[in-house]
Amino acid sequence: MITDDDVFFHPPTSDHYSWAETNYFGFYIAEENIHVGAYVQAKPNLGAVLSSVTIFDGISNTPHEVLYSDCHMHLPMPEGNLDDFVLENGLAITCTKPVMDYHLRFDDKNGVSFDVTYKSLMEPYDIHDPAMDPLADQIHTDDVISNAAYAGHWDQTGHVTGTLTIHDKTYQVDCVSSMDHSWGLRDEKQLKNFCWMNANFENDTSIHCLWLVDPEQLDNYPAIVHGYVREGDQVYGLKAGTGKVHRNGYLHQFLDLRVEDVRSTVHQFTGTPMTSNPWLAWPLMYLTHSFCRWDKGGIKGWGEVQDLCKEDFNGKIK
């Protein structure tokens, strides 16, 4: 169960350098096919913070062709705690209501900035709480994330509003999206063969999924490991799911997904990427990121897909 204190740094359970605590917030301007991701990974045992602010548009197989990337590997740990901090790259995050609401600011002093508020639409979804997540006690031998990098982890859907400025143009932000928070041992090569995604529909419904990915069979998601359906202020954990994926290499071209919640209600939805690009959040991390237009029985939605789908991080060698 997530409590208000979980917004703060957690005492490391190990003195290993890889102990990390992370926040991720995504938001978008749907009519412009622009998606923004703000990611922070703090490593208290090293006294360093990684921060990646990325703005995705278009489709490309090369990471340097995204609209904007500001990734810093070794920023100094800020004073204070995770509820209110400012990083040297210009990213500042303040929690205005414990584990629920946040104020995000960024200014690179070179023409790119945002100022947005995130207001939660649900309680944090604890993937390790069986009372909340019907898949909390399952064990997948191929899941190298849930009990290590995600030893503590919640996902959450929220309403994001504010502004994004890219040089001389300012966009209004008004969308429903996801954030997450994690703490645990997170080695640079550890995250692989995993998908984190969300779909947010016009009928006040959201679907959030964490899937396994098989790099040898990239046309499907072999198992769902965690997730939920939010309908208004009600949240239902997912107990099963299957997924088909059409790709161009690693990039997504079309997704056909089916999930079943604890009520045995089945939700079928498809996704068409409006953007699809590699995201290199750190040197040994290869991620495919897509901002998708979703369709669920004629109801339109928007959201993102993040696939860690490359078994070997160092090139063509297998």
Image (cartoon, rainbow, N blue to C red):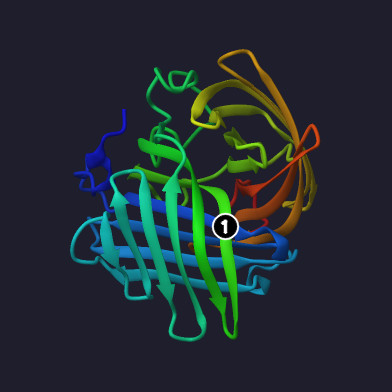
- Image coords of residue 68 (percent x, y): 58, 74
- Image coords of residue 317 (percent x, y): 65, 54
Q: Residue at x 73, y 40 (%)?
A: 218
Q: Residue furthest top?
A: 264
State the residue in front, 101 or 315.
101
In the image, residue 178 above or below residue 283: above
- Residue 314 visible in the picture: no
Q: Quadrant of residue 217?
A: top right
Q: Residue at x 23, y 63 (%)?
A: 47
- Image coords of residue 197 (percent x, y): 60, 42
Q: Residue at x 48, y 86 (%)?
A: 110
Q: Quadrant of residue 224?
A: top right
- Residue 160 visible in the picture: yes
In the image, residue 250 above or below residue 108: above
The quarter in which the N terminus is drawn is: top left
Q: Amino acid at mark 1?
A: Asp
| Pointer 1 local density, CA inside 10 Å: few below 14, some 14–19, many at least 20 | some
Q: Residue at x 50, y 59 (%)?
A: 161
State the residue in front, 89 or 296.
296
Question: Regarding mark 1 in the picture, which secondary structure is present there?
Answer: strand
Q: Which residue is mark 1?
A: 174
In the image, residue 240 above or below residue 215: above
State the residue in front, 101 or 216.
101
